[in-house]
Image (cartoon, helix red, strand yellow):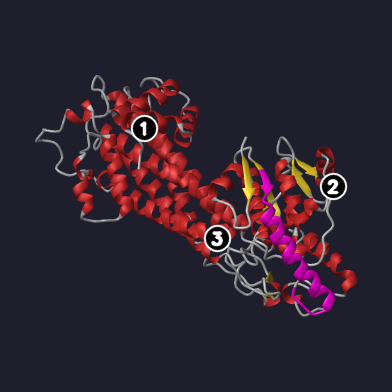
Amino acid sequence: MTTVTILSTGVTPADVLAVARGTAKVVLDPAATEAMATSRSIVDRIEAAGRPVYGVSTGFGALANTFVAPERRAELQHALIRSHAAGVGAPMPREVVRAMMLLRVRSLALGRSGVRPLVAEALVDLLNHDVTPWVPEHGSLGASGDLAPLAHCALVLLGEGWVLGPSGERVPAADALHQVGLKPVSLAAKEGLALINGTDGMLGMLLLAVSDARHLFAMADVTAALATEAMLGSERPFLPELHAIRPHPGQAASAANIHRLLQGSAVMDSHRDDLAHAVQDAYSMRCAPQVAGAARDTLDFVEVVAGRELLSVVDNPVVLPDGRVESTGNFHGAPLGFAADYLAIAAAEVGAIAERRVDRLLDVTRSRELPAFLSPDAGVNSGLMIAQYTAAGIVAENRRLAAPASVDSLPTSGMQEDHVSMGWAATKKLRTVLDNLTSLLAVELLAAVRGLQLRAPLTPSPAGQAALDVLGRTIGEPGPDVFLAPLMEAARDVVRGPELRAAIEREIGPLG
């Protein structure tokens, strides 16, 4: 159990992960509470003066010029939440919703939204009591932020809408709040708008994706090295001096990983001085660092974008310290949408080159004397033939998902919101691409381990032996065909989890 403190300067990516995926409790720093109270006092003064201010004394979107009488402004905020909670489809995962709620509290705590501290505290209470709003997957266009998803979260604060039950079922919010001893809140002027005008869903998914991609790109080096070893490939293309002359940092890091992973291998030693050995390996082996390294550099760019957004006030209008309330476009998700689309392209290619190595491992004409489809008795048995079919189908899906969402704007709100980012769609499909990449690396891991098993009695590298030890407990030794799906699921768990990487790093040191 850890505690994440939301400061008046924001939170860190690690904080978001600790709350979204862990059991961290959330507290508001006193300075953040004071910043919110100060900005709220400005809104109260504006209300008392009767000046027309968007979202405070007017309607929303195309209704921005419609004046709302003081006695109806609280009603306006509640109506806004109800009408904007208009999503449909399956619920978003708990980790996404929790990340989104934490990030909305973060934005409010920066003291530019004009809400009372109790509104942010109410969101914190939901997080700390593990009350997760039911947020449908469809509804956000990424401008003005993630309106519908955030409205579904805000609706729970009012004691309305739905939350996720223990088994994923839909539970009335009023019942869920009562069960944990929480009471609904009543919103004042500006507060409903401040709860939903943000990029928090997009940013939450992007931060989760960055963490997943960082791990998967390291595991892609592992599976590439194991596949290269099993195919009697050369380690020479991964020498550091060859990558120093093309100084892309991700490429150098990936090549260094693969080179270290291949050391200490009797399999590699067996053909190092063989003059009949192929002069050059295929691109899918030799160019692994160039592809995975470019993906790493893309990820570095995405981390910079996400880090900037974590420092940003994302609301409309915003309350400035000098008392002005100004309309902004900071809720527009273009930076996040572009970044997510870019990373989806990179991750799709990491998976595509992995599938090419799988195909080579299974092809008796190209695998350098491994049996067809890695079956000791091919013909009656099909080995991993259909595992490669599955991988090919996933590569095709990732290629479709790599088409950018961020160029697909559609106008809304009577042409007031005439360009939207589609950032929610971009970040959501990025998560699917990364999940698919996990499956593709799992197939490569399974095939590479089978290949190394079939090279016995030659012993693999320490990294290869770690893979044999970790995955071999589930998949057993090469032999007659078995029900393959459980083996593939086991390989997915190994790729996704920390065990194999930890075992390898104990042998060769930390992967770059």
As drawn, the label of residue 505 is 1
* Image coords of residue 59 (percent x, y): 78, 73
- Alpha-carbon span between mark 3 and mark 2: 32 Å
Closer to the chain start, of discs 2 and 1, is 2
Residue that badge 3 annotates:
309
Q: Secondary structure at mark 2?
A: loop
Count residues near mark 2 (Cα–Cα under 10 Å), then give few for <14, some for 14-19, many for 20+: few
* Image coords of residue 483 (percent x, y): 48, 25
Residue that badge 2 annotates:
183
Asked if residue 355 lies in the magenta stretch, the reply is no
Q: Quadrant of the C terminus?
A: top left
Q: Residue at x 38, y 37 (%)?
A: 444
Q: Is residue 380 visible?
A: no
On screen, residue 89 above or below 377: below
Residue bounds of the magenta highlight? 26-54
Farthest left residue? 275
Q: Main secondary structure of the magenta part?
A: helix
As drawn, the label of residue 171 is none
Q: Residue at x 82, y 73 (%)?
A: 47
Between 408 and 247, the residue placed more toward the observer is: 247
- Alpha-carbon span between mark 2 and mark 1: 49 Å
